[in-house]
Amino acid sequence: MSLSLFQQALRTIKVEKYHLTAVSRRTPRQFNHWFKWLAPGLLIKRWLFLSVTGFGLMVLGAATWVGLTPIYRLMDLISSLLGTLTQIIPNSISGPLALVLGLVLVFWGQSRSFDSITDVLQPESEEELVDVLLARRRLNRGPKIVAIGGGTGLSTLLRGLKDYSSNITAIVTVADDGGSSGRLRREMGILPPGDLRNCVAALAAEEKLLTELFQYRFNAGDGLSGHSFGNLFLTAMTEITGDLEQAVAASSKVLAVRGRVLPATLSDVRLWAEMEDGSFVEGESQIPHAPGKILNVGCTPENPPAVPAVVKAIEEADLIVMGPGSLYTSVIPNLLVPEIRQAIASRNVPRVYVCNIMTQPGETDGYTLSDHIAAIDRVCGQRIFDAVIVNRRSPSAQALIRYSQENSHPVFVDRSETLQLGRRIISAHILDEDLDTGYVRHNHQRLARVLLRWYGKTHNFKTIRDEEMVIHL
């Protein structure tokens, strides 16, 4: 008997749960949409209330000006109407009914007003205006992040960070002298736009379409063949605005870029590398192809000046990230600008280096994690970052075989040597592997999530215990 009662109770609970779920599913979408406008942080409700208050004061002021006669007559009219209404319908019913009706009319009117605004501002978008405003406010309150590097590594990082903050400043190397950028540099006398182009596309609102457009390369045409559309676009903007910094800023406004992209310097810098055998190699595109091990890198002219906006961005940053990217031709070239490395060293905020997953032939053959760190310290003459993010999982056997044919291998995490250099190790699964080609890259979403977790950990607790020198996120 008790068992059957228990089974009946279970069936009753399931039926009630089903009805509750069905009711919640039938909740009008518009009803939920209205209540989104009550969410804090939109900075709209206060101004609507202020407008209504101002309208009321205007009416009161006009009535006072003419001797309050309209007010008296209006009060008499309202009083007589309410008296008649309460004789027909009791005030216990008419009062709440009028209140509910007023609220419905207010919400309905405001909703239709904002829908009309949405139709004008976003005619082809299915996203509600309130959702856009909530997302925009959240991103505007995000931390001030400075990302330093170049190549595809920096653009990958930016693609993930823009989902957490719109206060992003990308500092990009301008030492490229190969491909389309190198041709424009030699023929037009402008700074190479290639890495800047990738970062602008990564931070753009319509990233997928813009990336395809900016990466499009002309396959025919006298002088056009081999050039990318993005490089030509930035070249034209440079001619119009006067310099590359202004060109990128103007392009960012046109393309609705979330954040900003800045060249590390406006000087015409050229990289050189000193090899282990004492020979010198000049040119960013030539360094990876030089035989032997890189001993030191520098640039001509020596000690180029930084763009003032770059130094200011570092001084105001909440989080500074270096890499990922080619160690000697993407990351370190930015640090050859004295003002940049000095500004980073002086900041007491989380400073993180994102190490590459694989070694790069011609640059970091056989390099361990501590070798990467030591190379940066050697160029800077001091320690400029506190933690390093490394990949925790090994690539697949297919990827390892493919990379081994190019003399490339996973960067070995030598923990004891890295800890002796005073760096905390943040170990996380940030690998993204293309199963068709076997290429290994950083997953931009996971990488950004790990960075923001680390930032939150250091920001909220200020200090990290010594036993947490190796952290798994």
Image (spheres, helix red, strand yellow):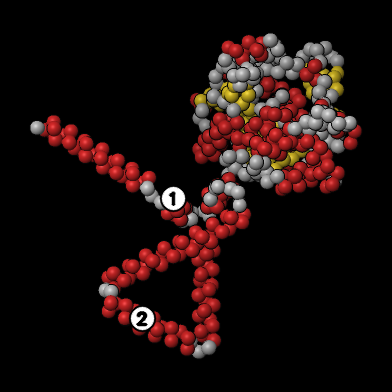
What x and y, as percent, mark residue 11? 22, 36
For disc 2, the marked residue is 81
Q: Amino acid at mark 1?
A: Arg
Q: Secondary structure at mark 1?
A: helix
Is residue 312 rendered to the left or right of residue 66?
A: right
User: Which mark identifies residue 29?
Assistant: 1
Q: Quadrant of residue 159?
A: top right
Q: Is residue 285 visible?
A: yes
Residue at screen point 89% across, 31% down: 222
What x and y, as percent, mark residue 366? 68, 13
Asked if the residue at tag 1 contacts the one at tag 2, i.e. Cβ–Cβ closer than 8 Å, the answer is no
Residue at screen point 51% across, 70% down: 52
Residue at screen point 83% across, 39% down: 235
Q: Amino acid at mark 2?
A: Leu
Give 62 or 77, whichever is nearer the viewer: 77
What x and y, as percent, mark residue 377? 70, 25
